[in-house]
Image (cartoon, rainbow, N blue to C red):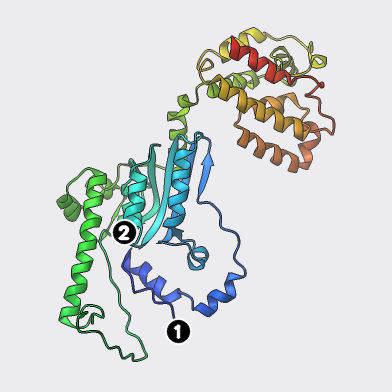
């Protein structure tokens, strides 16, 4: 007995469909391997204020062990992860990192509509392939950016049937002549083709709507079921421009930087504070700003007022509550970790709480430099109110 993967329509390239048919495991294999399965992880990652959602491998409606071991994607996961990113206040843009030959038709139209109706700006990036169902999803994004070697297309639907080795006798009710179609008969092939064309028409009309073109243009210029390389796809209207994933991330981070308001202003302030300064100057500046206990103050001289004036020129007045909360969280992480280095503390204050936490863990794992950064005694607290919090409150009330 084998799992029948050809009892449903697929939106994927021919070679990939053959691979699915050839390597799909038997139930016995699944039972053996399920015991080794790890907990399911989310498909979304966060880079600054940009969420990245991977759409890779074979796309299926539901999650499965087969999808897991072959690096596939389930639309049931995307339907949870993408809206979660959209609703996260820290996410200002979403990238769909598409690298897929397509997959099962079920759920694709619904998922594409979810993508299209997101409030957060969403860009699809194709580094390798966006074929069939994968391109359907990518087309729903606000923009499609592709690598110079990317392939896009395979627009259409495929219904496949396997000839079984064992002969099966089935008796179908007279009122249901289309219940068991024979693909080798003229009538059977015509009926199956009608279904495939109907599905393809929906595919084409949705892509046309998302890309702002006519269905006739999609039929004529979008590959006619074939694949187009990046620039040809752009010329045809299937994609918008050439780019790289890292470049796109940096672009979106910079574009939506101003939406952080006071948080970004504080970050710029602290980055300016650290830039080009030695440890002594940083300690003095931090002390003057209330970020170190009084015992640390008075070490060296530096024009703190000038630093603060230059660093807080833009964006500090907006979002002060958010800035205060983020800074509080970073300071708490530094305190709990026993950070003693003022320079390291200032660098952490220029990051988000999540980024700072990761940097602290990395620093703790670095045996060579850990001694210069950490201590078992917490020097950032003198038992009273957190000086950072006190200073931030004063600035927020000003």
Badge 2 or badge 1: first in the primary sequence: 1
Circle 2 — which element?
loop
Question: How many numbered markers are drawn?
Answer: 2
Is residue 281 at least partly visible in the picture? yes
Q: Going 52% across and 21% down the picture, which residue do you hit?
A: 319
Circle 1 — which element?
loop
Residue under label 1: 1
Q: Going 62% across and 21% down the picture, which residue do you hit?
A: 270
Residue 304 position, x and y percent, is 67, 10
Residue 307 position, x and y percent, is 62, 12
Q: Going 80% across and 16% down the picture, which residue do you hit?
A: 296
Indicate whether 371 appears above or below 78.
above
Image quarter of residue 11 = bottom left
In this view, the residue in front, 230 or 322, is 322
Work out which quarter of the rendered image holds the C terminus and state it. Answer: top right
Q: In the figure, is residue 85 to the left or right of 210?
A: right
Q: Which mark is residue 132?
A: 2
Marks 2/1: CA–CA distance: 30 Å
Is residue 151 at least partly visible in the picture? no
Q: Residues within 10 Å of mark 2 (few under 14, many from 20)?
A: many
Indicate whether 143 appears above or below 37.
above
Q: Going 69% across and 16% down the picture, which residue do you hit?
A: 390
Image quarter of residue 12 = bottom left
Indicate whether 147 appears above or below 260.
below
Residue 45 position, x and y percent, is 52, 45
């Amino acid at each position: 007995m084998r799992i029948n993967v050809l009892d449903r329509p697929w939106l994927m390239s021919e070679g990939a469909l053959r691979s699915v048919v050839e390597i799909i495991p038997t139930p016995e294999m699944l039972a053996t391997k399920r015991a080794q399965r790890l907990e399911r992880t989310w498909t979304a990652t966060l880079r600054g204020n940009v969420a990245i959602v991977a759409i890779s491998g074979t796309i299926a409606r539901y999650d499965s062990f087969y999808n897991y071991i072959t690096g596939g994607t389930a639309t049931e996961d995307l339907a949870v992860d993408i809206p979660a990113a959209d609703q996260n206040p820290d996410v200002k843009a979403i990238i769909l990192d598409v690298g897929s030959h397509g997959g099962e038709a079920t759920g694709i139209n619904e998922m594409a509509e979810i993508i299209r109706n997101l409030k957060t700006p969403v860009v699809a990036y194709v580094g390798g392939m966006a074929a069939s169902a994968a391109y359907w999803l990518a087309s729903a994004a606000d923009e499609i950016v592709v690598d110079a070697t990317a392939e896009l297309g395979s627009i259409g639907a495929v219904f496949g049937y396997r000839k079984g080795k064992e002969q099966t006798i089935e008796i179908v009710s007279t009122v249901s002549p289309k219940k068991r179609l024979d693909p080798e008969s003229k009538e059977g092939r015509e009926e199956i083709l009608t279904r495939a064309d109907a599905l393809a028409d929906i595919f084409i009309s949705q892509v046309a709507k998302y890309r702002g073109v006519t269905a006739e243009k999609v039929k004529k210029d979008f590959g006619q079921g074939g694949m187009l390389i990046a620039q040809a796809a752009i010329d045809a209207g299937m994609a918008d421009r050439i780019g790289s994933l890292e470049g796109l991330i940096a672009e979106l981070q910079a574009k939506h930087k101003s939406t952080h308001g006071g948080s970004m202003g504080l970050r710029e302030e602290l980055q300016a504070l650290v830039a080009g300064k030695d440890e002594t100057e940083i300690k003095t500046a931090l002390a003057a700003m209330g970020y170190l206990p009084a015992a640390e103050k008075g070490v060296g001289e530096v024009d703190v007022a000038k630093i603060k004036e230059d660093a807080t020129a833009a964006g500090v007045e907006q979002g002060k509550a958010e800035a205060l909360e983020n800074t509080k969280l970073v300071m708490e992480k530094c305190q709990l970790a026993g950070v003693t280095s003022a320079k390291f503390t200032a660098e952490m204050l220029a990051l988000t709480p999540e980024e700072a936490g990761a940097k602290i863990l990395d620093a703790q794992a670095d045996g060579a430099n850990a001694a210069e950064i950490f201590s078992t005694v917490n020097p950032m607290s003198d038992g009273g109110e957190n000086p950072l919090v006190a200073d931030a409150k004063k600035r927020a009330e000003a």
